[in-house]
Amino acid sequence: MEEEYFIVLCDLESIQPYPLIHKNHTVYYFISTYSAVDTNKYTNVHMIDSNASDASDHFMTFTASKLAIQYPKYTFIIVSRDKFSGVLTQLLQDEKRKVIHFKNASAYNQYVKTYAMTQEVNL
């Protein structure tokens, strides 16, 4: 069986606490420079220098489109409760991409634990 890989797009402005990370999950965190979220405990943070209300959401969508081309066989996981995340999920699905959408870190963390158990791998 071929190993499955995931791209996790996490909106730090709407999702806390810190999500778990599985070895097959590459996590990208998105935030704007005007957010009050402390990013020190995160790696791979993508920050946009803008005070527009949806700047990090648009940056996340832009990055998703680039990654979808670069990694055509990866499954996308969207972790965000913002309304834009439903649109991003739909756009990726319309392009025949596998997408899983979680509206909170707890649901994503439960998925990671369950996935690790079914794949018999460690987090």
Image (cartoon, rainbow, N blue to C red):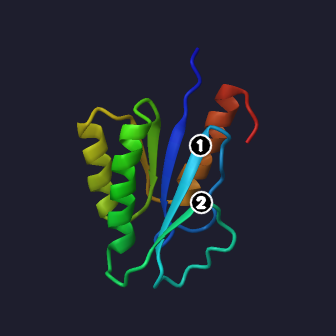
Q: Tag 1: residue type?
A: His
Looking at the image, residue 68 lies above or below residue 35? above
Residue lying at the far top in this picture: please name it. Answer: 1
User: Of the residues tagged 2 and 1, which is closer to the observer?
Assistant: 2
Looking at the image, residue 110 lies above or below residue 29? above
Between 111 and 23, the one nearer to me in the picture: 23
What x and y, as percent, mark residue 55?
A: 34, 73
What x and y, as percent, mark residue 102?
A: 45, 52
Taking the image as shown, residue 53 lies to the left or right of residue 44, namely left
Between 101 and 94, the one nearer to me in the picture: 94
**In what element is the residue under mark 2?**
loop
Residue, x 65% and y 49% (percent of image)? 21
Q: State the image quarter where residue 62 is shown.
A: bottom left
What x and y, as percent, mark residue 107?
A: 54, 52
Residue, x 58% and y 46% (percent of image)? 26
Q: State the image quarter where residue 76 is shown.
A: top left
Residue named by callout 1: 25
Between 43 and 85, the one nearer to me in the picture: 43
Residue named by callout 2: 44
Residue lying at the far right in this picture: please name it. Answer: 122
What x and y, as percent, mark residue 93?
A: 29, 39
Residue, x 56% and y 52% (percent of image)? 27
Taking the image as shown, residue 30 lies to the left or right of residue 55, namely right
Q: Residues within 10 Å of mark 1 (few under 14, many from 20)?
A: some
First reached walking from the N terminus: tag 2 or tag 1: 1
Q: Quadrant of the N terminus?
A: top right
Q: Tag 2: residue type?
A: Asn
Taking the image as shown, residue 76 lies to the left or right of residue 6, namely left
Do the CB atoms of the residues marked 2 and 1 lie less than 8 Å apart?
no
